[in-house]
Image (spheres, grey):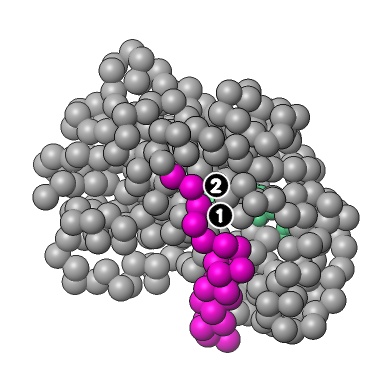
Amino acid sequence: MKKVLITGVAGFLGSHLCDRFINEGYYVIGMDNFITGDKKNLSHLEGNPNFEFIEHDVTKFVNIEGDLDYILHFASPASPIDYLKIPIQTLKVGSLGTHNLLGLAKVKKARILIASTSEVYGDPLVHPQTEDYYGNVNTIGPRGVYDEAKRFQESITMAYHRFHGLETRIVRIFNTYGPRMRLNDGRVIPAFMGQALRGEDLTIFGDGSQTRSFCYVDDQVEGIYRLLLSDYASPVNIGNPHEITIKDFAEEIIKLTGTGQKIIYKELPQDDPLQRQPDISLAKKILDWEPKIERSEGMLKTYNYFKSLSEEELYKRDH
Ligand code: NAD
Ligand code: UDP
């Protein structure tokens, strides 16, 4: 049985990846310190003989008994309000945390895949974004703590690949959504859905002309799975190229939820990217991957998940 370590396993993407690897017949060791994750995302795995959990902060030395075949490093705050609230931890998990996991991969002779992000492109001047675009990031702006941690993460990963011959994979994840996102994590989908469910107005930041391209979690997990098993060491974009303005998206959510909420406008956060769309030609070519789930289908599944949450969870304001 192959063994995989997944960091950030109690989070949104980590918990879905964990399910996928268990279903594929792997033994999964999950690691998390719950800084933005939730025990509930793992409750269905209680008693599963192919899963074990280690509560640990990956910025501290990481030790695992026995062999490891693969490491998936997904620990990191991912939502702007999270990484603005815990900026130093965000920088540390991308830098020190990644260093620890690369060191572990080297000792265990394991292949490691690290979770990078479309944020390495910053507020992009090339559209759609291809992997060879270097990006437009404000190093010292409020989002810099996340963007630069991820850029450093990519650099140190490539250094371990080149200098130590480590088998590495880098996925650049574009906005991904689905069940198990934290309702109060501030990202646009949980924010709008929570507002609709609580009967509040939907808050658009700026004039809503900024764009994003949303990928359903099952498609994202499939892309990551294929990338891990591929032999491609340079970064690969995984996301859904179907781009929409935030204003049109808010209107779609109002229609979907049938709640008839109003839209109100708030100030656009500093350095909020104006546009974002992945060019996925590379993933199509080397992984034979492209997203399959339409936004209407993915959003319905996500809405049904948020609707099933308790009143207490619906009104919980902070993590
Ligand atoms: P999330 O906040 O739901 O999950 C992150 C998990 O990492 C949480 O469970 C958190 O407790 C854990 N964690 C954070 N710091 C840790 C530390 N020092 N030690 C141990 N565990 C720690 O976020 P997510 O959306 O699941 O994102 C997962 C990964 O994917 C992140 O690396 C993120 O940068 C990347 N990513 C996500 C998206 C997206 O759209 N969801 C987009 C781009 C990149
Ligand atoms: N956004 C918004 N209202 C909200 C939350 C977010 O208009 O209540 C906007 C945000 O300014 C950004 C887009 O939605 O332009 C996507 O934000 P998110 O935090 O989900 O992801 P990111 O900016 O990291 O792509």
Q: Nearer the viewer, residue 46 or 252?
A: 252
For disc 1, the neighbor class at 10 Å (few under 14, some 14 to 19, many from 20) is many
Secondary structure mostly seen in the magenta stretch = helix
* 287 w.r.t. 167: above or below: below
Residue 215, labelled with which disc? 1
Q: Tell me which segment is drawn in magenta.
A: 289-312
Give the residue at x 34% y 67%.
42
Whether pointer 1 and pointer 2 mark residues with C-beta atoms closer than 8 Å, the reply is yes
Q: Residue 213 at what x, y percent from top left? A: 65, 51
Q: Residue 135 at what x, y percent from top left? A: 66, 27
Q: Nearer the viewer, residue 45 or 207?
A: 207
Mark 1 secondary-structure assignment: strand
Mark 2 secondary-structure assignment: loop
Give the residue at x 60% y 79%.
314
* 57 w.r.t. 302: above or below: above
Identity, as a three-letter code, of the amino acid under mark 2:
Gly
Residue 239, labelled with which disc? 2
Choose the circle earlier in sequence order: 1 or 2: 1
Give the residue at x 72% y 84%.
258
Can residue 280 be seen at all in this image of the molecule?
Answer: yes
Residue 251 lies in what quarter of the image? bottom right
Identity, as a three-letter code, of the amino acid under mark 1:
Cys
Decide if ligand 1 comes within 8 Å of the CB at mark 1.
yes
In reply to whether residue 297 is colored magenta, the answer given is: yes
Is 182 left or right of 244, judged from the image as shown?
Answer: left
Locate the C terminus by quadrant: bottom right
Can residue 83 be seen at all in this image of the molecule?
Answer: no
* 275 w.r.t. 194: above or below: above
Q: Residue 65 at what x, y percent from top left? A: 14, 43
Q: Residue 162 at what x, y percent from top left? A: 36, 15
